[in-house]
Amino acid sequence: MPHDPSHLRDDRALQVTRHDQVAVLALAGPGGKAVMDGRFFDELGAAVASLDADPDVRALVLTGAGPHFSFGLDLAEAQQTFGPLFGAAGAGPRLELLELIRRWQHLVDTVARSRKPTVAAVSGWCVGGGVDLAAACDVRVASADAMFSVREAKMGIVADLGSLQRLVGLVGDGHLRELALTGDDIDAARAERIGLVNHVHPDAEAARAGAVELAARMAANSPLVLRGVKDVLDAERGPRVEAGLRYTAVWNAAFLVSDDLAGALASFAERRPPRFTGR
């Protein structure tokens, strides 16, 4: 499938194209940066809801608009968001943080709750929130240059948008604990071995084309059956994931604003490794 990011001429964080019954959501990110800010989450929720309601769309593909899928949360915006919470007294700021986390979880969940099959085509870096988003899809494929990282531990954050809940059903408990506790990067070959991705393609263009072809094969089946298959498969997973997301949101509302987070944000700005103290 030809993929030319030069057509992305507006400032939308998401670009939508159609390939017959398959809709492709290209994650352009704010200002073309492959990161996720508040506007990105809003556009994601609106776009997926709109496509989910469109009877002419039978399947969705999520991919990066440029060479990378996503570097995750926009840390520059995160500094502005979290900064006022440091030293703030009372429950009010914690409740605001809880509501923000729950809102972002809900918007990522629009992908997982879609009644239509969803395929993530990952190339380049897929970090933090990018892994949350890919994990919310039904199936993942990757290019050979793809790199995955549940990076939040290295930023003083408990991953809170779905990776800890959804990946255990994909890669198994041991691999998930290793990824989440180390924050290490893994390449596409290992991602395929542990079940994080179903197929690895030679390059980004081949991965996107493969994802669209896979989505088209799904879209050729009965929409009612596709919805039924997803409902049945999610009957057990859905409540478990929701309970885990709610607990993680409460945990981070209580403990996210820490000396470790402040140090990690400062180290990111100063381009040096963080020094964690557990406070």
Image (spheres, helix red, strand yellow):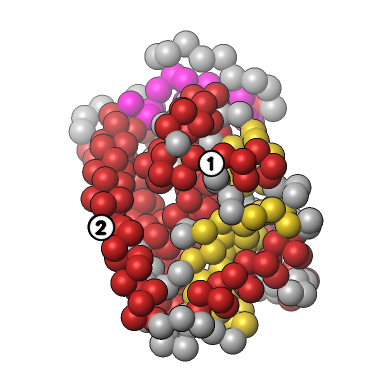
Decide whether residue 262 is among the magenta residues: yes
Few, some or many residues within 10 Å of mark 2 (<14, 14–19, 20+)? few
Q: For the point 75% across and 71% down, which residue is it?
A: 3
Name the disc covering residue 128, or none.
1
Is 218 rendered above or below residue 279?
A: below
Closest to the observer: 218 or 135? Answer: 218
The answer to whether residue 105 is left or right of residue 262 is left
Where residue 127 appears, x then y in whole percent?
59, 42
The disc labelled 1 sits on which kind of residue?
A: Gly
Residue 75 visible in image: no
Start and end of the magenta stretch? 255-269
Where residue 69 appears, x then y in whole percent?
64, 54
Image quadrant in which you'd find residue 114 = bottom left
Residue projecting furthest to the top: 277
Few, some or many residues within 10 Å of mark 1 (<14, 14–19, 20+)? many
Q: For the point 42% across and 13% down, which residue is it?
A: 278
Where residue 141 appears, x then y in whole percent?
62, 57
Is 158 rendered above or below residue 238?
A: above
Q: For the point 42% across and 62% down, which residue is it?
A: 111
Instruction: Read off the residue under disc 2.
Output: 235
Decide whether residue 141 is among the magenta residues: no
